[in-house]
Image (tube, rainbow, N blue to C red):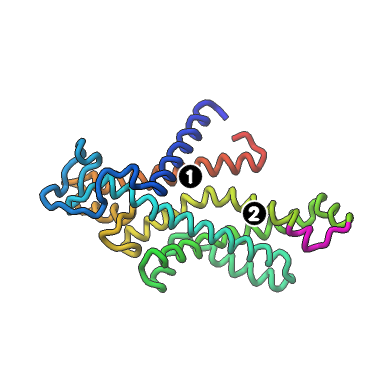
Amino acid sequence: MTRAQTALVWGASVVLLVIAFAAVFPGVLATHDPLQTEVRAAMLPPSPAHLLGTDQSGRDVYSRLVYGTGRSVGIGLLATGIALAVGLLVGALAALAPRAVDAALMRVNDVLMAFPEFLVALVVVAVLGPGPVNIAIAVTLAAVPVYIRLARVQTRTLRRAEHVEAARILGVPPVAAFLRHVMPGVLGSLSVLATIGIGSSILAAAGLSFLGLGPSEPTPEWGLMLAGGRNVLGQAWWIAVFPGIAITLTVISATVVGRVLRARADGRAS
């Protein structure tokens, strides 16, 4: 990698570390109670007293941004983790199943992959109803087809690998050989893909919250904060701009780090 690429990766890693710290220890970084309202301090611009200003109810935008990190990022991480587990299980079963079962599963999977992930998530939330739990379910169902396809391909490839055949020749039981030599490789490939997919899941969850399908007020959540400030951009731009910046930085940083890990996994330099 060039120096500029290396600096970009380090910068993305630092951003992700800060976000992780804010998600786990929001009280250490926050300066105010994220739910405390003060009408007389409504829509104050950024200042030493309120680093990122205040919203329409006088709540500190910076503190709400910090406390919203855990919810916004947590939904993306939860959805990605479940999608990875489901994709690993279904993809491996499809690769091992009879040809008719494999073909049927893949046709259903192809249909789901034909639609944009956000559209699938939006339809699922429309069916299940709004709420953070339903958003996590929707984002999971939207993301899982990609993991299923990759798990199927990797399982088929690794089953025929030389080291797996050697293990069988040496008398290792088929199930033990599969669990010991095939599944770790499949999980490694899915984990690299998940690093990139985290950003997409966070973006999808924030988008659903922006549409009013996620947590409700006064919950601090990035998408909800962005939606709350869109109608007062002319008077108080900071209410919507800073949550938007947080979402953008998180998605870009996760994508950059994920692509580097994927390049290394593929044996490429950049």
- Toward the top, the furthest residue is 3
Residue 199 is left or right of residue 39, and the answer is right
Q: Earlier in the sequence, mark 1 or mark 2?
A: 2
Say what amino acid the circle numbered 2 marks: Leu
Name the element at disc 1: helix
Residue at 45% from the left image edge and 65% from the top image edge: 138
Residue 128 falls in image quadrant: bottom left
Residue 245 falls in image quadrant: top left
User: Is residue 152 visible in this depiction of the protein?
Assistant: yes
Q: Which quarter of the rendered picture does the C terminus lie within?
A: top right
Name the element at disc 2: helix
Residue at 48% from the left image edge and 44% from the top image edge: 254
Looking at the image, how many numbered discs can be counted on the residues?
A: 2
Q: Position of residue 231 (x, y in %)?
A: 21, 54
Q: Which residue is mark 1?
A: 254
Residue 123's place in the image compared with 160, above or below, is below
Q: CA distance from mark 1 to mark 2?
A: 19 Å
**Relative depth, front residue between 209 and 70:** 70
Q: Which residues are magenta?
A: 171-179
**Relative depth, front residue between 110 and 81:** 81
Q: Position of residue 76 (x, y in %)?
A: 45, 55
Task: Decide whether residue 122 is among the magenta residues.
Answer: no
Residue at 18% from the left image edge and 41% from the top image edge: 45
Say what amino acid the circle numbered 1 marks: Ala
Q: Position of residue 31 (x, y in %)?
A: 27, 43
Q: Residues within 10 Å of mark 1 (few under 14, many from 20)?
A: many
Residue 267 is left or right of residue 37, and the answer is right
Q: Position of residue 216 (x, y in %)?
A: 29, 63
Q: Which residue is mark 2?
A: 187
